Image (cartoon, helix red, strand yellow):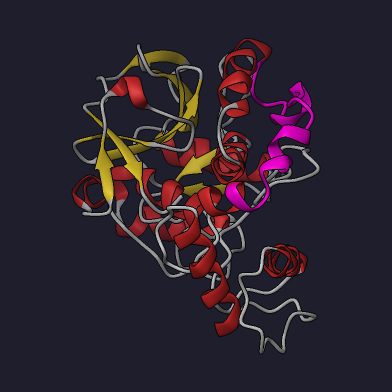
Amino acid sequence: MADETGGRKTGLTRLLRYGSAGEDVLAVKRRLFELGCYSPHITQLKTNAFGADTRAAVRVFQAQNGLETDGVVGPLTYGALFPEAEADAPPLERTAISPNIGDAAAALILPALERAGAVRRGIVFDALQFAFDAEVARDYPVSLYIRGGNLYNTDLTPNVITLARISSGAKRQPEYYDGGRREMMERAVLENPDITGADCSGGVVGLLRHAGVVAAGFDLSADGFHAKADIRHIPSAELAPGDLLHKSGHVGLYAGGGYAAEWMGGAYGCQLTKLAARRGWNFVKQKTDRFGAWTGYLHPTWY
């Protein structure tokens, strides 16, 4: 799996909020203390726990800097706390994107990720490791399309697909496994026993869970993303890596550079597709299929 910071030495890799713990929390606490945002009666500065006094200090800092005073350290708050972090970070290298993505796509995606925040970069790097790029020949998908599956479970472990899972799914929903799809999936599992699987919304849900920008139990349908109040609808020209793409009954993740990662269907698994002309490699029929254009462009406000 690609490192969530894309190999960078600094940067926010998750949202920090009440209850979080770790060295990143301790770094934030020390910076807040240096800036005089804590109560003079602080007693927990030496621990790596994000407690009530840290939340209050974050809110003081946010108010001083014209930010939303939610007490959560997200990309905007982190950037204001550590403006030197991005300036000191080295440029992203080709190795930041997993080798299942070809050089042509990587050359366009990397510059877009350079301009994105660390959380968005982490989500995209995570997504790309599961996507099939037609430039890099493979016999099977990198990640399968499994109806009703989430890419990461509620304990944040990958959703690994087994032959038993495929057999169970085929019995419950045979329409998603017919026409040679089941056989292709079974061969993929035999080829890679660690292969993951999800459906379109489960892929996006899993990525957001894994990034820590939503709760581990968060779940939402493709059309639910489109209708959710705290997801802003934007024109395609405003898309940034980590934004979402929607058409009726389907959702994907914008990777940047005109590319998307999407769990397309049983014959396709997760694919890297072009925003302007959606095409998917059909692993059952061994041909490229055309798909309709995205109709909605969504900007989550959680990161």
Name which quarter of the figure residue 248 lies in. top left
Residue depicted at 21% across the width and 54% down the height: 229
* Residue 87 % position (x, y): 72, 33
Name which quarter of the figure residue 234 lies in. top left
Name which quarter of the figure residue 246 lies in. top left
Residue depicted at 75% across the width and 69% down the height: 26
Residue 220 as seen in the image, left or right of residue 271: left
Q: Is residue 19 magenta?
A: no
Total of numbered circles in the picture? 0
Can residue 34 be seen in the rendering of this structure?
yes
* Residue 94 % position (x, y): 75, 21
**Residue 207 vertical placement versus 268 (above, below):** below
Q: Is residue 82 magenta?
A: yes
Residue depicted at 68% across the width and 46% down the height: 4
Residue 78 as seen in the image, left or right of residue 270: right
* Residue 190 % position (x, y): 66, 44
**Residue 44 vertical placement versus 95 (above, below):** below
Residue 80 as seen in the image, left or right of residue 43: left
Instruction: Name the foreground residue: 128 vs 53.
Output: 53
Instruction: Name the foreground residue: 244 vs 33.
Output: 33
Instruction: Name the foreground residue: 191 vs 195.
Output: 195
Instruction: Name the foreground residue: 107 vs 58.
Output: 58
Region of the chain picked out in magenta, as a range = 80-102
For the N terminus, the image quarter is top right
Can residue 280 be seen in the rendering of this structure?
no
**Residue 42 vertical placement versus 214 (above, below):** below
